[in-house]
Amino acid sequence: MKKLNIKQTRQNLLNKKITCQKLVEGYLDNITKQDGRIHAFLEVFEKEALAEAKKVDEKIKKGESMRALDGITMALKDNLLYEGHLASSGSKILENFVSPYTATAVKKIKDAGAIIIGRTNMDEFAMGSSTENSAYGITRNPYDLERVPGGSSGGSAAAVAAGMCAAALGSDTAGSIRQPAAFCNLVGLKPTYGAVSRYGLMAMASSLDQIGPLTNNVEDAKVLFEILKGRDEKDATSKNFKDSKEKVLKNLTIGLPKEYFAKGLDAKVENNILKKVELLKAEGAKIKEVTLPNSEYALASYYLIMPAEVSSNLARFDGIRYGHSAEAVKDLFEFYARSRAEGFGSETKRRIIIGTYVLSAGYQEAYYHKAQKVKALITQEYQEIFKQVDVLLTPTTPTPAFKIGAKFNDPLTMYLSDIYTVSANIAGLCGISLPAGLTQEFLPIGLQLLGKAFDEETILKAAYQYQEATDWHHKHPF
Amino acid sequence: MPVSKNLIDHLADLAKLELTAEEKRRYFKDLSSILGYVEKIQALGVKEEINLIKENGIDVWRKDEIKDCSVEEKEQIIKSFPEKESALLKVPGVFE
């Protein structure tokens, strides 16, 4: 069965082929049937979703005008604030935290009519590539329950892949939207830093975080991006930007960076992606091999910048104003130290320690400042390459989804999962992961397109034309 | 850069984070291996004059003024206080 996109679903609602209530009940049914074993959701807003659906059906009955997302059911990653609802960021320290206000991105999709069906599991404070770092248990990959869905937006990816909602929001600091999208056969868009407001997104690494959609297809990614993008006075780094003149595939030059097709890349993934390059060539795109020698430093600079910002951002969790508070302590220091010890999980503590080191006296220049300079250098290198090519094409991940537990005790190996996605965050680019087919073991493979800053239009257009020539995005996990 | 076990104690103090002996042992090992990996950036020569503020392209100003929030927002924030007396946040004593 082919999956419907947002536009087609809206059309079906308007033509009264299905009621919104039936649609939402269908998702809730899937949650009941599937989520016991997948565990994509931390909480399902069943009553609210059904009440919203009823309103949509009334509107249609009365023939009122419909907004872009009226009747479209979406899930939120647990690090997005939604007034009056719990938001824990997958952490025990925020177990009972209720959002006092709504994130701009959430407000925008709500204002466009989206029905929020629940909040999804994630690695604690978005730190991880497997959704194994949640205080509330792991999420399983719908394509293989023994494997991870990717992370940190693993719950959002699993929820969309398993048909438990039409689309979801995630956040991406080094690949946390694109990598789970690749592992779960979805489209995952990481907008350019500054394209989408981060107001109300719990900060992990503020200079790299971006909110974006996880969807079944490119059309939906575009619809949601159009709604999400733009300047928000509550996020000083957000901006308005003009759409570039998009090019059709046959006028497009696609760059293949040789550093992304090197040691460490699984042969199955490599063969698959190279076949897609042939496909795009047949569609008329020009292919050009390029080299980005500094890109190999992207992950290393990330693992200095990110923990530094994590240790600063997470300093706000002191047990005093909100969140978990330690009891029976002897002084203020012990109160802070124990509240944080009891509330944070192991990966979070690890990154706080690394970040504290990186920012501590004597090391700040050698590590944090140096990493920022490397970041600037990498950014320049990508800017130069985008004078020669319109988009870059790479695998999204070096391997398909790995087994649960396989990398859990080896942080460095886990960190290498982000090797192909992290550059987009470091260099301030936009990127999209697209379904590229399944391995013999029925594991999805993701293809990544990278575009220059604020040129989402071009990668979305190229992605759409790629999708038109393929049908992997219609594959179901069950 | 050598990582000593005492360093982990010092970092835990700076980060206001209580760590168990087992955690200290583990993070000591992890910090050494992660720093071993990130050290590679030292090999890359960068020009000292890179202006980080300019590179990040951020130069946004706004008036420094108080903006009120909604009653619901206030109520929810107060509700989240771990300890309170009426609408006031109760904090542990700073001095003996």
Image (spheres, rainbow, N blue to C red):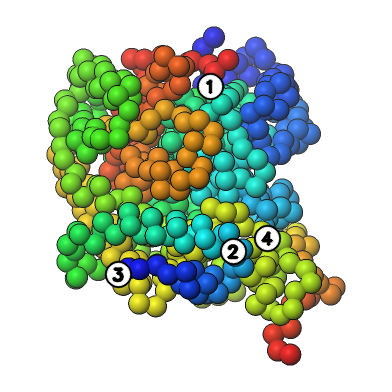
Q: Nearer the viewer, mark 2 or mark 4?
A: 2
Which residue position is annotated with label 2? B21
Q: Chain of mark 3?
A: A
Q: Residues within 10 Å of mark 2 (few under 14, many from 20)?
A: few
Which residue position is annotated with label 3? A366
Separation of disc 2 and disc 4 at Cα? 15 Å
Marks 3,1: beta carbons within 8 A: no
| Quarter occupied by the N terminus of chain A | top right
User: In terms of secondary structure, where does tag 2 sit?
Assistant: helix
Q: Is residue A289 visible?
A: yes
Q: Chain of mark 4?
A: A
Separation of disc 4 and disc 1 at Cα? 34 Å
For the point 65% across and 47% down, the residue is: A135
Looking at marks 3 and 1 on the same chain, the residue that comes earlier in the sequence is marked by 1
Q: Nearer the viewer, residue B84 or A442?
A: A442
Which residue position is annotated with label 4? A342
Identify which amino acid the numbered label 4 is placed on.
Glu
